[in-house]
Each structure stands twice: as C-alpha cells, then as structure tokens.
Image (spheres, helix red, strand yellow):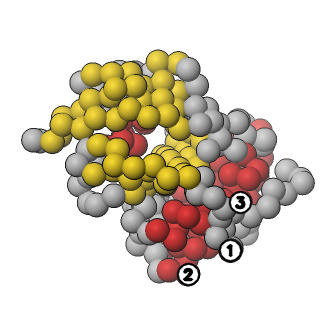
Amino acid sequence: MTGRSGLEIALEKVAFRYAEMVMGFDLRFAAGSVTAIMGPSGAGKSTLLNLVAGFEAPSGGRILIGGENVTGLPPAAHPVSMVFQENNLFSHLDVAANVGLGRSPSLKLSGEDRAAVSDALARTGLSGKEKRLPSALSGGERQRVALARVLVRDRPVLLLDEPFASLDAALRREMTDLVGELHSRIHMTILMVTHDEQDARQIADRVVRIEDGRIAGSDAVEAPSPGGRLPESGGE
C-alpha cells in the first residue's frame, strides 16, 4: 500500500452560520502539508474540518480539494478521512474487522483488502492484536485502530479533530509521532485540530489560529521540535 499524495485544499470566501456566529474562511492548505488548527473552544475549528469533510455545507463560497469543487457534495464524494476524539470503533467487532470497515462497509474483503488491513495494522504497531475487541485495548491502541482504518481507506486528505485529547501527555506524544511517521511515508495533506501547542509544533508545517469563526493568524513552523516528525523510511 503506497498511499496517495496529498491534495491542495482551498476555502474560497467560505461562509457558514452557526447560531448567532457568522463564520468566514478564506485560505489554502498546500498539498502534502501538515497544518495545526488552534483556537479557543467554540471558535470554529471543528466547523472548518466539517466543511472540508462535507459534513456541513457553506452558505457561500467554494471548497476545492485538488482543484475540484466539492462544495455541497455529500461526504462520500470528498477525498477525505477523519479521526475524532471518539474513535468510533464498533465494540462487537475485533480490531481487524474495525479496520476492514475502512475498505468495505459490508466487510466483504478480497485478498488485496486483507493484505491492506494487515499492512495498516503493522504500520500502526497493532500486529498480533487483530482478534482483540476494543474493550481489551488501551485508549492509545484504540486510536491506533482508528488510524489504521484511515490508512486502508487510502484518501489523500486526513482530518484530525482532537483525536488524542483524552490521552495522557506521554500517549499524546506517541500518537503524534505516529501521525508524523505515517505522513513521512504517505504525504497526505493533514489538518489537525488541537489545543496543545507542543503537539501542534511537533509535526506541523504551519499553525493556523481561529477566533470567533475567522482566521486570526497563520505562522510557519520552522522545524519540528526534538522527537517530532520522524525521518522518512526507505521501505514500504
């Protein structure tokens, strides 16, 4: 599984109303980049991800992914995978089946599909745990399963909505390192909502700050902090 290269994301004068707040986003994310989205609670960070994913439709403007206008299209038509703080695993399915859902919702998996699941589990450090149920996993392991499911979907854009917020500091660093390692291999375009400045600067190229539904600032990250993005591996 080689994965696709990331795609540019463009929000062109995108407007969205939530309760009394009128949000406006006008920015681009370079193909293959990693951007941390930061800001206070209720500022519109998750809404931005939901607009890119197609879970919300803007009231104005356009959303383009890889140059294609996806505004108003259903989520399935957006070349995007998303990982939430709640990992959305099915408690009655084992690890392999939960990952396999990313390949086939009916779990009718071909030999190629099963090989992709096995490869994703290996990449996320879950080999040997294929038959375990989510209840037998730690919080970090459950999020690894969610990331493995993303890998088998093979989408060029990955959206992370505070997926590691409920983990302790050591596990957050471990999971952020894993995302950095996966990016070095696959080069997805990644948008990651986080409240943690260190997590943001650990793997991000850029930090975008949102306040009151607007872009308040954008800063390039000169270099990852020690222990951040891992060097690219030579093999697949």
Mark 1 is surrounded, within 10 Å at the Cα level, by few (under 14), some (14 to 19) or many (20 or more) other residues, namely few
Q: Along the horizontal axis of the image, is 51 left or right of 83?
A: left
Real-space Cα separation, disc 3 to disc 1, in angstroms: 14 Å
Q: Can you say whether 86 is above or below 50 in the image?
A: below
Real-space Cα separation, disc 2 to disc 1, in angstroms: 14 Å
The numbered mark, 2 or 3, whose residue comes first in the sequence reads: 2
Q: Position of residue 145 (x, y in %)?
A: 58, 60
Q: Nearer the viewer, residue 105 or 116?
A: 116
The numbered mark, 2 or 1, whose residue comes first in the sequence reads: 2
Q: Position of residue 169 (x, y in %)?
A: 50, 80
- Tell me the residue at 68%/51% (across/down): 183
- Tell me the residue at 34%/49% (across/down): 216
Q: Nearer the viewer, residue 51 or 223?
A: 223
Labels 3, 1: front one: 1
Q: Is residue 23 visible?
A: yes
Residue under label 3, please give it.
Answer: 181
Give the amino acid at mark 1.
Answer: Pro
Q: Identify the secondary structure beneath mark 2.
A: helix
Circles 2 and 3: CB distance less than 8 Å?
no
Q: Nearer the viewer, residue 38 or 140?
A: 38
The numbered mark, 3 or 1, whose residue comes first in the sequence reads: 3
Q: Along the horizontal axis of the image, is 11 left or right of 234?
A: left
Residue under label 1, please give it.
Answer: 226
